[in-house]
Image (cartoon, rainbow, N blue to C red):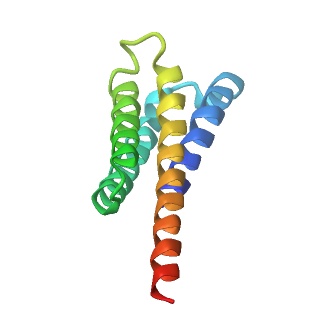
Amino acid sequence: MGIISSVGCIIHCLLMPVLLSSAASFTAHEEYRWLDFLFLAIAAIAVWFSARKTNSLLVRIILILAWAVFAGSIIWEESIPFASVLMYLGSVLLIVGHVLNLRYVHQCNDHSHSHSH
């Protein structure tokens, strides 16, 4: 869920500027601002569950930091000139955190299965 929402967010973030600049009907970004908050909420849920379940402190830190960067970039989008860069950074870090979490869980499961045989 976390990886899918993060990838969806990156796609949204990459396509939205193109859509806004190329189509007259998409010139009002405020109409689509709810998508930013939707991705933020989905990411928060995914981070919450992943951070709660992982035993890796590094994964927890990456996920929470990534979400905070992502959230800050959305909340202060109009105030921070480089907010779009932070949005991409937060999205990429969310993907990295979730992939590391999946790898960590997979490694832990492999080790527990090998000890039981």
* Residue 78, quarter of the rendered image: top left
Please name whichever residue, 60 or 113, is drawn nearer the observer in this view of the structure.
113
- Is 75 positioned to the left or the right of 2 in the image? left
- Residue furthest to the bottom: 117
Look at 33% across and 47% down and name the residue there.
Answer: 57
The picture places residue 55, in percent across and down from the top left corner, at: 33, 58
The picture places residue 3, in percent across and down from the top left corner, at: 53, 54
Look at 66% across and 22% down and name the residue there.
Answer: 21
Look at 57% across and 25% down and name the residue there.
Answer: 27
Residue 42 drawn above or below residue 11: below
The picture places residue 101, in percent across and down from the top left corner, at: 46, 56
Count of residue discs: 0
- Is 34 positioned to the left or the right of 98 in the image? left
Please name whichever residue, 26 or 70, is drawn nearer the observer in this view of the structure.
70
The picture places residue 86, in percent across and down from the top left corner, at: 47, 24
Look at 28% across and 59% down and name the residue there.
Answer: 52
Please name whichever residue, 35 or 100, is drawn nearer the observer in this view of the structure.
100
- Is 99 positioned to the left or the right of 22 in the image? left
Residue 16 drawn above or below residue 103: above
